[in-house]
Amino acid sequence: MRAIVTVIGKDRVGIIHQVTGILAEHRVNVLDISQTIMQEYFTMIMLVDTALCEISFSELSELLLHTGQEMNLSIRIQREDSFEAMHRI
């Protein structure tokens, strides 16, 4: 299953490393990534494939949420179909 990961917060060294490290640790493949700095804020959106993930989607979501709280970032994951439904005009 494909999903969208979003990361937003104050920029600092290591954000991409930490987030992609968690994904790799659980066999989540990054298919596409876009990141930018808006003044002092870091923003990133990734399209990922969770087909080989070794934990449930809800566990992965909680792990990313908790990691975000520890890093003072907003890290969210949504199933691609849910993301698309929310952003249809």
Image: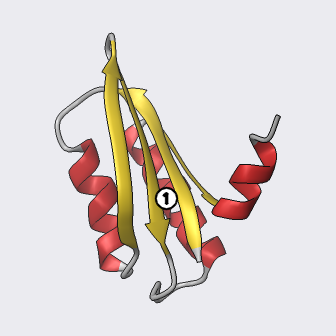
Tell which residue pokes out farthest to the top in this image.
39
How crowded pointer 1 is (Cα within 10 Å; few <14, some 14-19, many 20+) is rated as many
- The one nearer the camera, 27 or 1, is 1
> Residue 61 is drawn in which quadrant?
bottom right
Judged left or right of residue 75, residue 58 is right
Please state, as top left, top right, bottom left or bottom right, where the C terminus lies in the image.
Answer: top right
* Disc 1 element: helix
The image position of residue 82, as x and y in percent, is 75, 58
Give the answer, above or below, for where 51 lies relative to 14.
below
The image position of residue 56, as x and y in percent, is 60, 83
Q: Which amino acid does label 1 sit on?
A: Leu
Please state, as top left, top right, bottom left or bottom right, where the N terminus lies in the image.
Answer: bottom right
Residue 10 seen anywhere in this rendered image of the structure: yes
- Residue at 17%, 36% in the rendered image: 13
Judged left or right of residue 14, residue 27 is right
Give the answer, above or below, for where 68 lies relative to 25.
above
- Residue at 50%, 45% in the rendered image: 6
Judged left or right of residue 10, residue 17 is left
Query: Residue beneath label 1, please?
Result: 64
